[in-house]
Amino acid sequence: MIIERKQISELCEQLRNEGKKLVFTNGCFDIIHAGHVYYLTEAKKLGDVLIVGLNTDDSVRRLKGHSRPINGEQDRAVVLNALKPVDYVVLFDEDTPIELIKQVRPDFLVKGADYERKNIVGADFVESYGGRVATIEFVEGKSTTNIINKMKTGDEN
């Protein structure tokens, strides 16, 4: 379900009261590919409810440059929401998800294995109340950048 940012704190409190373990991850998810599906499937296995923080178009441009995103935030949210492992999608416009993480207070904060623990935004906060930080390996060769490059040049590298 795609939810408004203003609803996330109340929703998460309700889910915790029901005994649910919350898993949170975030990203641009510009062009969904098999690597994303694997990553989200593995993240969901860590708990009961997977909440995905999705960068808005403006925040993607600040992070990735003026040519991104390829797909707009509403389209990206709809596609993510359709994936079986994803329970909730919430947009955020900040450069980092720290404020959203503070609202969610997940049991598990998940990022790709290319992130070192010290570089995972929100890790200290999540661990401060007993939450855990997990990383998930990527599927080799599967990335949005590779797809874009292949579309431009016909070359996957």
Image (tube, helix red, strand yellow):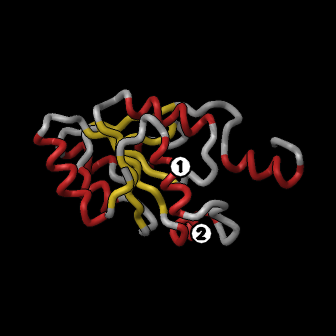
Q: Depth check: 124 or 86 in front?
A: 86
The local secondary structure at tag 1 comes to helix
* Tag count: 2
Residue placed most toward the observer, 44 or 98: 44
Identify whether 70 is placed above or below 107. Answer: below
Q: Secondary structure at mark 2?
A: helix
Judge depth for marks 1 and 2 and give the one in front: 1
Q: Tell me the distance, in whole angstroms, between the alpha carbons under discs 1 and 2.
A: 19 Å
Q: Residues within 10 Å of mark 2 (few under 14, many from 20)?
A: some
Instruction: Please tell me which of labels 1 and 2 falls first in the chain.
Output: 2
Residue depicted at 53% across the width and 49% down the height: 79
User: Which amino acid type is marked by label 2?
Assistant: Arg
The reply to whether dot 1 and dot 2 touch (C-beta < 8 Å) is: no
Horizontal side, residue 35 vs residue 126: left or right: right
Tell me what residue is drawn at x 43 percent, y 69 percent.
93
* Quadrant in which the C terminus appears: top right
Q: Which residue has dot 1 on it?
A: 79
User: Residue at 46% of width from left, 31% of height from top?
Assistant: 41
**Image point (55%, 58%), residue name:** 75
**Residue 53: x, y in percent?**
40, 54
Q: Residues within 10 Å of mark 1 (few under 14, many from 20)?
A: some
Q: Quadrant of residue 15?
A: top left
Residue 150 at what x, y percent from top left?
82, 47
- Residue 13, disc: none
Residue 134: image location, x then y, percent:
38, 35
- For label 2, the residue is 61
**Type of amino acid under label 1:** Val
In this view of the protein, which residue sits in the foreground, 18 or 58?
A: 18
